[in-house]
Image (tube, grey):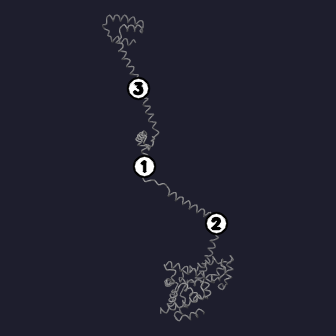
Amino acid sequence: MRKEEETDKLIKNPLLKQALKGNPFLLPDEYFINLTNELLMKTRISEMGDSSFKIPAEYQDDLRLSILSKVTEQKIKTAVKSSKPKLSSDYIEDLQQRILNKTVHLDETVKEANHFKTSNDDKSFNKVRRIGQQKWITFVAAASLLLVMGIFAILEGKKNTTKLNSKTTIVQVESLQTDDIINYLAYYSEVGDLEYLSDQLEDSLNSTEGISTQEIKSYLEYSL
Amino acid sequence: MSKTIEDAEILKKFNNERTREEAFTDLLNKYQERIYWHIRRFVLSHEDTDDLVQEVFIKIWNNLAKFRADSKLYTWIYRIATNESITFLNKKKQMLNISIDDESSSYLAETLTQSSYFDATKAELTLQQAILTLPDKQRLVFNMKYFEDLKYSEISNILGTSVGALKSSYHIAVKKIEKYFSEID
């Protein structure tokens, strides 16, 4: 009763003395029995947690290295993503125009290129190369056409030359003398014809009525 | 029987892996009620006390093998319980934006009236309210001296305060409580 003696000396208030003897704090039934069981269960769990799961030797070191490498990998991926070259907003349009210049507007580009080739001061000019290497078909077609035209021309030329020679022959016969004609016939004609023609020719010469000059020319053409 | 088991016996059994759990059971039977009330009178709430008691004894289980017996076992257990309780209340003060230097424990008064595990007469309620006007350390001294019936030397070992300071603190605490009662009346 030590505490009461000491406190009784200090406290005079009877109400306080009475209050000090009571205990207003409550707790659940069988709390301490349950508390013991709960604490024992927790200690058993903590013991199991330490030894029930076994891990391979050097697992912790390997795990650490694995985690570090994954972190580094993630950092690299992030860095690559952020450093990826970005396309300018009008890149696609420029690309389209450049393609058109090299295809649809190719002739204009070549003319431009030729113009700039003669300009020695324009050093910024870039050589324009034709694209479309398959233009050889056009060249072949053009060459073939030229060949055909040439052949026709040659053939036509021969025909005209023949006609022209006939016309020249007629002009030359008209200018020939009778004696020349007789001599020619004597040289080139057959014997029988020659005698007959000579006789006939003299007769005709003596009588030129009924045989025109044209008839004689025609006969000569036939004979020749 | 288990309640009268000596601390030395408990320690010996605990150091043997086969009898460790039995030793811990003995320790619980001997100290769990005392530790419960030591904490309960300080933090007032049964739920908070339950959590703290379990934390204290789990800590004891984890560290008892390292106990070097340079102090008595019950002193070591009480010290753990006291430090855990003070830490808990300091955290509660921070949550309520109350300065740790604020010595008043009046913020706990609401805990008293709202708890379903508190059934007090008017005088008992007034007493608890009076005790809450004391600083935390003085409250501990009063509780340990009057309600737990510990010697000043034992309280000195637990709190690390001289016997003289403890006596003075206790007397001041009693006077304050009486004055509170007189003012209420």
Q: x, y percentage for residue A19?
A: 53, 91
For image coordinates 58% across by 84% down, the residue present is: B38
Instruction: Return the x and y of residue A92 as percentages of the image width and height.
Output: 43, 51
Nearest the eye: A200 or B83: B83
Label 2 crowd (10 A; few <14 / some 14-19 / many >=20): few
Which is nearer the N-term, disc 1 or disc 3?
Answer: 1
Q: Which chain contains the residue that carries disc 3?
A: A
Disc 2 element: loop
Image mark 2: chain: A
Label 1, on which residue?
A94
Label 3 is placed on what type of residue?
Ala
Frontmost residue, B87 versus A14? B87
Is label 1 in contact with label 3 (beta carbons under 8 Å)?
no
> Foreground: A191 or B106?
B106
Chain for disc number 1: A
* Quadrant of the image containing the C terminus of chain A: top left
Disc 3 marks which residue?
Answer: A153
Q: Where residue B113 appears, x then y in whole percent?
A: 49, 85
- Of circles 2 and 1, which is in front? 1
* Among numbered discs 3 and 2, the one appearing first in the sequence: 2
Q: Callout 1: 10 Å neighbours few (<14), some, many (20+)?
A: few
Q: Name the residue under label 2.
A: A55
